[in-house]
């Protein structure tokens, strides 16, 4: 994916891909038959589809914000092979190269939720192998509800949470627990949208008369725009459907910039309606 940089008013925004990985296509599309989802998302020999983890860098005045931290670099060779993780460099290096900002100068890290593919880059090993915050001077934000769920997950989603992604941050005194809805900096809001779980948050940025909305795992890729194309990973798929029916038409009507975190090729899109159906196209 080519580097993407945009401005919303006086805020600078850069997309920072962490790594590519693969998840089972059937799980990613739920009840949708393979004959349909395999057209926009061709699977490999292990039925995995190609995904990315696209973090957002936002420069807002003195604040240098990173939304999500990808899958991290703490994986064994065995598990990296299972998830087909393809990494060119560390997240910290990607942040430095793409944004020009070293990890030490990131001031805020936001986790929409604490699943390993969204919060894995929160921590990394130091020279002695101890896990430490990847961004040593940042305040890390996550909702209190999501933190409480991560500490006591359901049997169904237990494998999605890895305490080493947040406990070293908490031990370092850098973790701040937030409300179900809160404003990070002027115009940048985090809002809880149930469906994927009860406590995942989506990001809304309104600046310069435009709106950028990150759908996170509510709509993980462009292929998930159709209402019924919902992941099996979602704990509450009916609520996912309700949220999509509420937000996606509004996004098309108001010409939002739509950000799809897991899309490997075109994470930033706009939505258009054709023949009564919504479709994602390049935002420019």
Image (tube, rainbow, N blue to C red):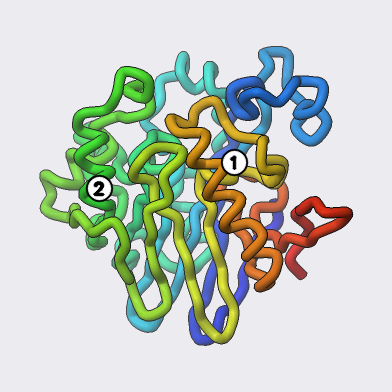
Q: Is residue 231 left or right of residue 153?
A: right
Residue 41, image x, y percentages? 75, 32
| Location of mark 1 (residue) | 52
Q: In terms of secondary structure, where does tag 2 sit?
A: strand
Q: Residues within 10 Å of mark 2 (few under 14, many from 20)?
A: many
Crowd rating for badge 1 (residues with CA inside 10 Å; few <14, some 14–19, many 20+): many
Q: Nearer the viewer, residue 91 or 214?
A: 214
Residue 264 visible in rendering: no
Of label 2 and label 1, which has the lower sequence position? 1
Count up the numbered dots. 2
Is residue 91 or residue 8 the one in the foreground?
A: 8
Which residue sits at x=19%, y=34%? Answer: 130
Determine whether 18 is above or below 80 in the image.
Answer: below
Q: Quarter of the image holding residue 28?
A: top right
Q: 122 or 111: which is nearer to us? A: 111
Q: Is residue 230 above or below residue 249?
A: above
Q: Is residue 239 above or below residue 212?
A: above
Circle 2 or circle 1, nearest the eye: 1
Residue at x 55% of width, y 86% of height:
208
Locate residue 147 relative to residue 259 in the image: left or right: left
> Which one is nearer the viewer's eye here, 12 or 268?
268
Q: Which residue is mark 2?
A: 133
């Amino acid at each position: 994916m080519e580097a993407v940089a945009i401005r919303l008013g006086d805020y600078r925004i850069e997309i920072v891909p962490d790594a590519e990985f693969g998840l089972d296509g059937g799980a990613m599309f739920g009840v949708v038959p393979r004959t349909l989802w395999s057209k926009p998302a061709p699977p490999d020999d292990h039925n995995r589809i190609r995904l990315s983890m696209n973090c957002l860098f936002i420069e807002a005045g003195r604040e240098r914000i990173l939304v999500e931290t990808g899958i991290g670099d703490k994986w064994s060779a065995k598990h990296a092979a299972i998830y087909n993780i393809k990494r060119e460099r560390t997240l910290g290096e990607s942040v430095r190269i793409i944004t020009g900002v070293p990890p030490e100068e990131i001031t805020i890290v936001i986790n929409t939720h604490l699943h390993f593919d969204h919060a894995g880059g929160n921590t990394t090993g130091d020279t002695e192998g101890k896990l430490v915050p990847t961004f040593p001077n940042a305040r890390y934000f996550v909702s209190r509800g999501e933190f409480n769920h991560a500490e006591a997950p359901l049997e169904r989603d237990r494998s999605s949470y890895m305490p080493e992604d947040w406990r070293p941050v908490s031990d370092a005194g850098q973790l701040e627990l937030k409300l179900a809805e809160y404003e990070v900096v002027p115009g940048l809001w985090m809002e809880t949208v149930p469906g994927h779980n009860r406590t995942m948050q989506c990001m809304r940025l309104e600046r310069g008369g435009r709106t950028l909305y990150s759908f996170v795992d509510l709509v993980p890729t462009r292929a998930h725009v159709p209402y019924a194309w919902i992941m099996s990973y979602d704990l509450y798929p009916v609520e996912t459907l309700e949220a999509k029916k509420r937000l996606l038409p509004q996004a098309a009507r108001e010409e939002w910039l739509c950000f799809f975190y897991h899309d490997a090729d075109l994470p930033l899109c706009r939505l258009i309606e054709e023949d009564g159906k919504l479709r994602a196209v390049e935002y420019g």
